[in-house]
Image (cartoon, grey):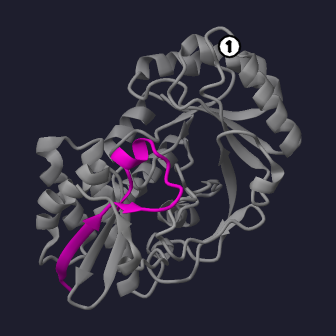
């Protein structure tokens, strides 16, 4: 089997937020072959990511065997070295890598989960990310919630955060799982102050309270905070996560497979996390790209709800009674109606 074309675009869909996802938005990579099979993957970087795929990664793949993923991945990594292997370029690479994994599953008539040593049909518990008020009717049967609280703290006044957490706990009950997301907007003092006030409400983790590169302060926070600290959504490459593990920056690691380097990177990150005895909860894990890894590589999987505005992927398993299940369709189990895509242009 040989690759005959590599195509890429940034799809649009109704309800897509008017924020960084449009300038650093999700991209769709399609890898065509002479067998008639096409593999699909999703990456990031918006139109800049599209440019990286078109001008660097495409040349690494054209005419090559898509089933030899390690070789293709190494070549793509070398191609992005001159522009930096992390951030936007790694987001673009992620989409191309995932398309190769999708192709390999289709070629072998098996799921990506099966390629990774797992199986389809495994129900995985889901936690639902909420940006405003927690309501049972919006939780898709789950009693696990991650609540965004970054805008509720104002300097020394953390009472709005405490009240939001109290209300969320009342809704999901004492047995529900509750996490907080500060989305890089706090400092050390604010995070510790919040933790002091909400610890009795049994918070599973506080996510990304500090800027992602402030690793020294994160280490200090981990030593002082009574609540586990989660992060890694905005970290890249297996090597980058190795550094996070060596220095024990986070208690809970959260790579996003569509940004961190694709499935090839995520498999390595899982292996390192297992060896280090650390917990890994992939960002947006209920979406098909991370879901297959959770089904195969995680002994105690927990999947974050996906983004409802990504409507251009068909075959995404729904959340039912608080769980999501990998389908038995080959590859990632999705299809794309390319003729119906609305795309961003330069």
The quadrant where residue 5 appears: bottom left
Work out whether 106 lies above or below 141: below
Work out whether 72 lies above or below 224: below
Q: Is residue 3 magenta?
A: yes
Q: Which residue is mark 1?
A: 193
Work out whether 156 lies above or below 10: above
Instruction: Evaluate whether residue 75 shows in this view.
Output: no
Viewer-side residue, 37 vs 266: 37
| Quadrant where the image shows the C terminus | bottom left
Viewer-side residue, 185 vs 202: 185
Q: Residue at x 35, y 43 (%)?
A: 236
The quadrant where residue 170 appears: top right
User: For the residue carrying disc 1, how many other residues have a C-alpha within 10 Å: few (<14), some (14-19), or many (20+)?
Assistant: some
The outermost residue toward the bottom is 35
**Whole-percent x, y for residue 291 in the image:** 54, 63
Instruction: Evaluate whether residue 186 shows in this view.
Output: yes
Q: Residue at x 44, y 42 (%)?
A: 19
Q: In the picture provided, is 142 more to the left or to the right than 66?
A: right
Q: In the picture provided, is 61 more to the left or to the right than 14?
A: left
Q: Is residue 295 magenta?
A: no
Viewer-side residue, 64 vs 208: 208
Query: The residue tagged with tag 1: helix, strand or loop?
Result: helix
**Whole-percent x, y for residue 31 in the image:** 26, 75
The quadrant where residue 123 appears: bottom right
Q: In the picture provided, is 125 more to the left or to the right than 220?
A: right
| Quadrant where the image shows the N terminus | bottom left
Q: Residue at x 31, y 86 (%)?
A: 37
Residues in magenta, as a range:
1-27
**Whole-percent x, y for residue 240 in the image:** 34, 39
């Amino acid at each position: 089997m040989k690759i005959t074309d590599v195509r890429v675009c940034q799809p649009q869909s109704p309800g897509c937020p008017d924020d960084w996802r449009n300038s650093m938005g999700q991209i769709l990579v399609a890898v065509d072959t002479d067998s008639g099979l096409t593999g699909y993957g999703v990456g990031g970087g918006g139109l800049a990511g599209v440019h990286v795929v078109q001008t660097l990664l495409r040349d690494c793949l054209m005419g090559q065997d898509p089933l030899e993923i390690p070789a293709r991945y190494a070549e793509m990594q070398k191609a992005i070295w001159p522009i930096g292997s992390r951030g936007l370029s790694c987001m673009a690479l992620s989409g191309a890598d995932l398309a190769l994994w999708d192709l390999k599953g289709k070629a072998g008539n098996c799921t990506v989960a099966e390629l990774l040593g797992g199986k389809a049909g495994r129900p995985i518990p889901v936690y639902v990310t909420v940006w405003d008020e927690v309501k049972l009717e919006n939780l898709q049967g789950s009693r696990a919630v991650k609540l965004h609280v970054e805008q509720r703290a104002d300097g020394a006044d953390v009472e709005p955060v405490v009240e939001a957490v109290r209300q969320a706990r009342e809704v999901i009950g004492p047995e529900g799982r509750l996490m907080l997301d500060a989305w890089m907007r706090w400092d050390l003092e604010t995070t510790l102050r919040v933790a002091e006030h909400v610890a009795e409400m049994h918070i599973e983790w506080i996510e990304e309270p500090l800027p992602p590169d402030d690793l020294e302060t994160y280490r200090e926070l981990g030593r002082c905070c009574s609540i586990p600290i989660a992060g890694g959504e905005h970290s890249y490459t297996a090597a980058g996560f190795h550094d996070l593990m060596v220095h024990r920056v986070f208690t809970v690691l959260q790579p996003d497979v569509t940004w961190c380097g694709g499935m090839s990177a995520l498999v390595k990150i899982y292996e390192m996390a297992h060896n280090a005895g650390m917990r890994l909860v992939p960002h947006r894990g209920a979406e098909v790209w991370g879901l297959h890894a959770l089904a195969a590589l995680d002994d105690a999987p927990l999947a974050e709800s996906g983004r409802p505005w990504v409507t251009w992927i068909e075959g995404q398993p729904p959340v039912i009674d608080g769980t999501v299940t990998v389908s038995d369709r080959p590859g990632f189990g999705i299809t794309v109606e390319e003729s119906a895509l609305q795309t961003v242009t330069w």
